[in-house]
Amino acid sequence: MHLTVVGNPGHRRVTLFTAAAVRAGLAEPEVVSWQDVLTGVPLRLRPGTVVRVESPGEDAEVDRLLRGAVVPAEPGEIVGGRAWYAGFAAALDRVAAAARDQGAHLLADPAETLLMFDKTACHARLLGAGIPVPAALPGSPASWAQLRSWLDETGWRRVFVKPCHGSSASGVIALQLGSGGRILATTSVELSGGRLFNSLRVRHYRDERDVAAIVDRLAPDGLQVQRWLPKAGLDGRVVDLRVVTVAGEPSHVVVRGSRSPMTNLHLGGVRGDLCALRAAAGRHYAEGLATCRAVAACFRGSLHTGVDLMFAAGWRSHAVAEVNAFGDLLPGLHVDGRDTYDAEVAALLTCARTGAVA
C-alpha cells in the first residue's frame, strides 16, 4: 500500500501519521502541501495511492489562501469563517478531482468532511438519524438583537453560541441570561478594538455591549445556537468525552474536565480518569459508545471521526455536541500500545487485505 497525505509539511499531524505508517512497515507517505493545492500547482498522485486529507490549520498563509484574503490574519484573529469554508470546499474539490483523474483513493468522502465542518448541517444529519443532540435554534441569528429576541421567545436562558464553521472552540460562547438583565458570557474570545482574537485564557463578559459586539462580529459568518446541556461532573469538574472512531468503532477516548463550561484541553481543560468516569456512568457509558458507533455510521465514507460526547448531570442521558473531521489528534494517548494514527493505519491494512481499499 502506498500513502499520500495532503497537509502542511512538517506539522505534527503529518509527522505523527507518517510515524505510524513507518511503524506499520509502510513506506513514508508522500506529502502534498495545502499551499500547492491552493495555488494551482499540478497535483501528482500515484495511481492506486491512498490519499489522507489532513487539517489545513495552524498555517497563516494557508488560512489566507483559503479565505481568498489579500493579507494574512493577525495571529489568533477570528475572521472570515464563511469564506474559509468556501475555500476549503473548493480545495477539497480539487483534491478529489486529482484523485479521480489519476486513479487514487480518498480516505474520507469530501462531502462528509464538509458536513462535519458545518455545525448546522451536521446537527440536522444527526437529528435525522435519531442520534441524541442538544436542542438548537432553527436558524442563524443575524445579530445580537435577533439572538436576544429569539432566546426571549423560546425562554432559553443558557445556550452555547457557536460559529458554524469554526473549530477548537474558536468563537464559542457559553451564554447565560439572568434576571434583571444580568448576563454572563464565558468564552476564549478576546475583544480588541472591535476585532476578535482567540486566547488561551477563558474570559467572562458581563457587559451586554461587549457580548453584542462579539456576536455582531461573528454573526455574518453563520452561528449555531445550542441549548446548554448541564454536564455530568467528576472530581469537581464538568466533563465530556472526545471519542475517536476508526472504521466505525470507538478506538480512543479522552476525558476532558474543566471548572469552566469550556472543556477544550488547550483552554485549561485537563485529561480526566477514564476508569473513574466509566465507574460513575455505569451502564450508561456503553450506551454512549453505542451512540458514537451510530454517529460513525452517518459518515461511512470517512475512516475516522472525532465525536464530542456529553453526559448530562446524573449520567442517565447523553448527547453529541459535535463531530470533528480532524478530531483524532490525541498525542500521548495509547490503547494497547497504539495511538490514534496506529489504529487508523491498522484499519487501512485490514481493509487492504479484504480488498476494501487498494
Image (spheres, rainbow, N blue to C red):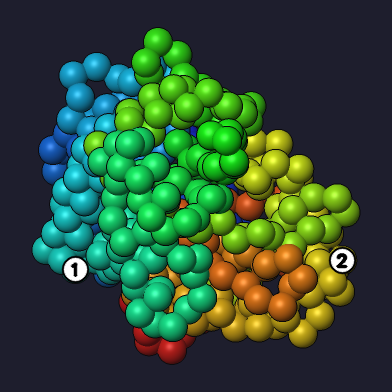
Task: Residue under label 1, please give it.
Answer: 103
Percent x, y for residue 353? Answer: 46, 85
Residue lying furthest front: 180
The dot on residue 354 is none
Q: Secondary structure at mark 1?
A: loop
Height in image: 194 above or below 282? above
Residue 179 appears in view: yes
Q: Are marks 2 and 1 in contact (CB under 8 Å)?
A: no
Task: Residue under label 2, please give it.
Answer: 276
Displayed quadrant of residue 187:
top right
Which of the two residues, 142 or 252, is positioned nearer the viewer here? 142
Q: Amino acid at mark 1?
A: Gly
Upstream in the sequence, badge 2 or badge 1? 1
Percent x, y for residue 323? Answer: 46, 62
Percent x, y for residue 141? Answer: 30, 46
Which quadrant, please, contains the N terminus? bottom left
Which of the two residues, 79 or 336, is positioned nearer the viewer here? 79
From the viewer's perspective, is 271 left or right of 37?
Answer: right
From the viewer's perspective, is 198 left or right of 343?
Answer: left
Tell me what residue is drawn at x 26 percent, y 41 percent: 142
Percent x, y for residue 10? Answer: 47, 35
Height in image: 294 above or below 276? below
Residue 7 appears in view: no
Estimate how packed mark 1 is, as few (under 14), some (14 to 19) or many (20 or more) residues with alpha carbons within 10 Å: some
Tell me what residue is drawn at x 33 percent, y 20 percent: 73
From the viewer's perspective, is 76 left or right of 206?
Answer: left
Distance CA(mark 2)–CA(mark 1): 48 Å
